Amino acid sequence: MIGQTLDALGQGFHVALQWHNLGWSFAGVLIGNLIGVLPGMGPLSAISLLLPLTYAMDPVTAILMLSGIFYGSQYGGAISAILLNLPCHPPHAVTCLDGYPMTRAGKGAKALGITMLASFFAASVGIVIMIFASPWLVRAAFAFGPAELFAIMLLGLVAGGTLSTGSALKGVCMTVIGLLLGVVGTDVNSGVQRLTFGMTDLSDGVELVALALGLFGVADFLRNAGTMHTTGSSLDIRWRDMRPSLSELKASFMPMVRGTGVGVLFGAMPGTGPTITTFIAYALEKRISRTPHRFGHGAFEGVASPEASTHAKIQVDFIPTMSLGIPGEPVMALMLGALLIHGIQPGPQLISQHADVFWGLIASFWIGNVLLVLLNVPLIHVWVRLLKVPYRLLFPTALFCICTGVYSANNSLFAVGEVLVFGLMGAVFVALDFPVAPILLGFVLGPMVEENFRRALLMSQGDLGVFASTPVAASLIAATATLIIVQLGLALRRQYPKRIPAA
């Protein structure tokens, strides 16, 4: 069995290393990397714009190029998140929490170096999982029904309060605001519009990219609008600055491993996006850390774990997409559409009927990630030089790119207005010492929690016992209850500390 797998993988490398396939894979990685850095852009916009170009391509070449754009833009998004506090792709909002403070402390290049190592390590593990564990992961995906998905997303929602560097109560309040924003739009079951206030532009809900860029990028610009000095004027940038020390590597290694594990777990679950994965990886890392107070102030673990989780999920996400025909996120839905356009039907028979596509794609992942490292070793110096740009030039340029990117996604000026509104909200919340990251978590998870809760009750004819009917769901519900009890205990302990009797 292993011998047959290795033979098939060898054939995949033969396909991926053909000059035309290798060239398009390189082009995809380069385009994705550049688009990921641009504020307001992301893999969804890039693949949507370039998908028509693949109509005349060979199916294998088209999928290799689109895949290169996908994971190339993931790393590019981390660059703008770390250097400019702009999460151009929502999963990188978590990276902003510690990546940008590292930049402000003069460690931006090391943060990018850790990101590069974490992404390559996690992608390599994800590829190995794809090769040898695809059948098992497909069976595991079938074990997660609506009740199990509700339970694990509820756990992630409750854990969102732990992302706060201050009061857990403030984190919960921000999560509730995210939940309210998440229910805006048309209810998929009843067709009733909720919280749209008569505005037809809100019938499809709040724009996720507008929310992320407003809360993190624009809010930071508004808070620093009076700053006219150069952001990186105090940094002495050298090539060796990208290389983390042995102690920094040691501190980042286990977070990489744990983040990769979280990414693999969520990658096998259809319907879960990478944003959920990064939030849960970060919350897990902060929960088990002996020094959780460092998170949010430039902890290496706060960059390594979420970046590893998102890159591992990207690779494993292809398993349910190609083996079951179930995309895990909108980008995967586009990849699914690209397969269908070229007459390739995703499903259990894909490996046997289109072995060149499946194994060529897996081989291209490794080749593409190597190309990504080779590209970014020289390019990181270029990105770090962005820190030399004065704020008075950087602000209007970045805001123009944000508005252009958000407008081009849906050709809607209303989305640009959303960015401004959420930017003002974010600036006010940060000024009042309220964390904004839980808003994004509540926004993403809220609709999924509601959808799976209603679906589970519909299937069980209203029996709440369905959420404890399987060991997986019961364990996750118990973990959520435990987390709530622990948080309440800590809050009461801070509110009513033990009084030391007078001697």
Image (tube, rainbow, N blue to C red):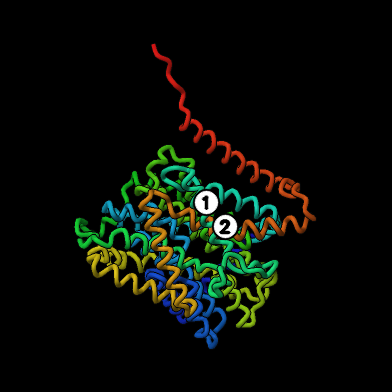
Badge 2: how crowded within 10 Å, few (<14), some, or many (20+)? many
- Quadrant position of the N terminus in the picture: bottom right
Residue 346 falls in image quadrant: bottom right
40 over 493 or under it: above or below? below
| Residue labelled with disc 2 | 445
Q: Give the side of residue 196 with respect to residue 41, left or right.
A: right
The disc at residue 280 is 1
Give the residue at the far right of this rendering: 461
Q: Who's the residue at 58% across and 78% down the image?
A: 338
Residue 420 falls in image quadrant: bottom left
Residue 448, how many percent across, how many down? 61, 59
Q: What residue type is labelled 2?
A: Leu
Q: Give the side of residue 178 with respect to residue 481, left or right.
A: left
Q: Give the side of residue 377 with respect to residue 124, left or right.
A: left
Give the residue at the far top of this rendering: 503
Q: Who's the residue at 57% across and 81% down the image?
A: 59
Q: Which amino acid does label 1 sit on?
A: Ile
Residue 435, how many percent across, how many down? 43, 51
- Dot 2 lies on which element? helix
Give the residue at the far bottom of this rendering: 56
Which badge, 1 or 2, comes first in the chain's sequence?
1
Quick check: can you spot residue 277?
no
**Viewer-nearest residue: 325 or 153:** 153
- Quadrant position of the C terminus in the picture: top left
Residue 267, how many percent across, how many down? 58, 59
Residue 468 falls in image quadrant: top right
Give the residue at the far front of this rendering: 198
Disc number lying in front (1 or 2)? 2
